[in-house]
Amino acid sequence: MNVRKLLIVPLFAIAFLSFKPIDKKIIVIDAGHGGQDKGATFEKASEKQIVLDIASKIKEINNSQSKYEVVLTRDDDSYPSLTERTDKINSLNPEMVISLHVNRTPENETSKNGHEIYIQNSDASKNIADKISKKLGNCSISEKNLHILRESKAPAVLVELGFINNTEDRKYITSQKGQKEIAQKFVEFFNEQ
Ligand SMILES: [Zn+2]
């Protein structure tokens, strides 16, 4: 066998291996609450389930995209503590963190509706909130001293996706259609970064 033939196979192998894609940048989606902590509830609807459903759909829709890898802080009905969540986030060193929540007011039915975003005291966090606000529709944006925002080293925002005790909001955020639309908007936002 001549020497050239002997070299071809290993050279192909090296060329192939060197095309392994570089690691994608990470975006963390934190589905708030979980397990015993249901978050806001209304009859059978619970915040912990709504945000898990939407977080899972964001990951699923994003999987067909190539730019970012979406990592969830929980992908089932478990309750990682707030410290466990931010430890995981800081070990991943993501591009950004989006924590998903659902609002509730004390009364049975509220006329309040729509989104609210809480941010860190940084331009990067404010910038993410502004862009999400454009996608979801007008959101009120304010700083808040919350664990996930305070302890995440990466730019982070906490998004309240609607009011569980507003009938229209609840119908939307518990429906397949509404959840898919919301997830799609987040993935569009990621791809515009
Ligand atoms: Zn919450």
Image (tube, rainbow, N blue to C red):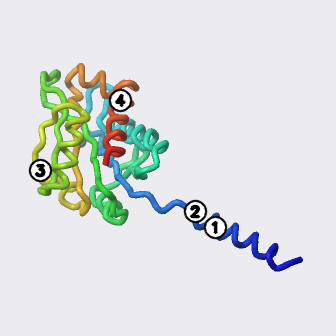
Q: Is mark 2 within 8 Å of ligand 1?
A: no
Q: Is residue 45 above or below residue 126?
A: above
Location of the N terminus (image quadrant): bottom right
Q: Tell me the residue that label 1 is attached to.
A: 15
Identify the residue shown where x is 38% and y is 24%.
Answer: 177
Provide the secondary structure element on which disc 4 rests.
helix
Secondary structure category for the residue under label 1: helix
**Ligand 1 sits in which quadrant?**
top left
**Mark 3 or mark 1: which comes first in sequence?**
1
**Label 1 vs 4, first from the N-terminus:** 1
Write down the quadrant of residue 160 in the picture.
Answer: top left
Q: Residue 16 is drawn in which quadrant?
A: bottom right
The answer to whether the residue labelled 2 contacts the one labelled 1, judged by CB atoms less than 8 Å apart, is yes
Task: Tell me the crowding category of disc 1: few under 14, some 14 to 19, or many 20 or more residues within 10 angstroms, Cα based.
Answer: few
Asked whether the beta carbons under mark 3 and mark 1 sit within 8 Å of each other, the answer is no
Disc 2 from disc 1: Cα separation: 7 Å
Q: Position of residue 28 (x, y in %)?
A: 34, 52
Amino acid beneath label 1:
Ala
Helix, strand or loop under label 2 = loop
In this view, the residue in front, 7 or 29, is 7
Image mark for residue 181: 4
Whether pointer 3 and pointer 2 mark residues with C-beta atoms closer than 8 Å, the reply is no
CA distance separating discs 3 and 4: 27 Å
Say whether disc 3 or disc 2 marks the residue closer to the N-terminus: 2
Please name the amino acid that badge 2 sits on.
Phe
As drawn, 180 above or below 142: above
Mark 1 vs mark 4: in front: 1
